[in-house]
Amino acid sequence: MKATREDEARKLRKVDDDEKAEERRIKGEKEKREKRDTQLKGMSADEQRKFLDKERERDNKRMQKKRVTKG
């Protein structure tokens, strides 16, 4: 009986921790997006284009790396 109760408590704690981690991740992503948007608004058109090109290249490299490690 005690073991069952402890297992259930452990499961509930794990679910709670997972939810909190998800909330922190979402909050971090939102802050990054807002910072990026603010940074882009302060740039000229050419600077924005260069910034977005670099960002796209970085994303492509990450995707290629993921494909290589999975395959």
Image: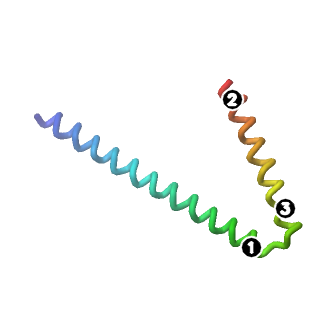
For label 1, count other residues whose C-alpha is less than 10 Å away and answer few (under 14), some (14-19) or many (20+): few
Q: Secondary structure at mark 3?
A: helix
x 69%, y 68%: residue: 37
Front-most of residues 66 and 47: 47
In the rendered image, which quarter contains the C terminus? top right
Q: Secondary structure at mark 2?
A: helix
Which quadrant of the structure image shows residue 10?
top left
Type of the residue with mark 3: Arg
In the rendered image, which quarter contains the N terminus? top left
N-terminal label among 3 and 2: 3
N-terminal label among 2 and 1: 1
To which residue does mark 2 refer?
69
Q: Going by the image, does 34 lie left or right of 64?
A: left
Residues at discs 3 and 1 in contact (Cβ within 8 Å): no
Q: Which mark is residue 41?
A: 1
Q: Which mark is residue 32?
A: none
User: Residue 50: percent from the left, percent from the top?
Assistant: 86, 60
Q: Which mark is residue 49?
A: 3
For label 2, count other residues whose C-alpha is less than 10 Å away and answer few (under 14), some (14-19) or many (20+): few
Front-most of residues 54 and 13: 54
Determine the CA span between mark 3 and mark 1.
Answer: 12 Å
Q: Secondary structure at mark 1?
A: helix
Type of the residue with mark 1: Lys
Q: Nearer the viewer, mark 2 or mark 1?
A: 1
**In the rendered view, would you say 33 is above or below 16?**
below
Which quadrant of the structure image shows residue 61?
top right
x 27%, y 45%: residue: 12
For label 3, count other residues whose C-alpha is less than 10 Å away and answer few (under 14), some (14-19) or many (20+): few
x 22%, y 40%: residue: 8
User: Residue 22: percent from the left, percent from the top?
Assistant: 46, 52
Q: Going by the image, does 25 lie left or right of 71?
A: left
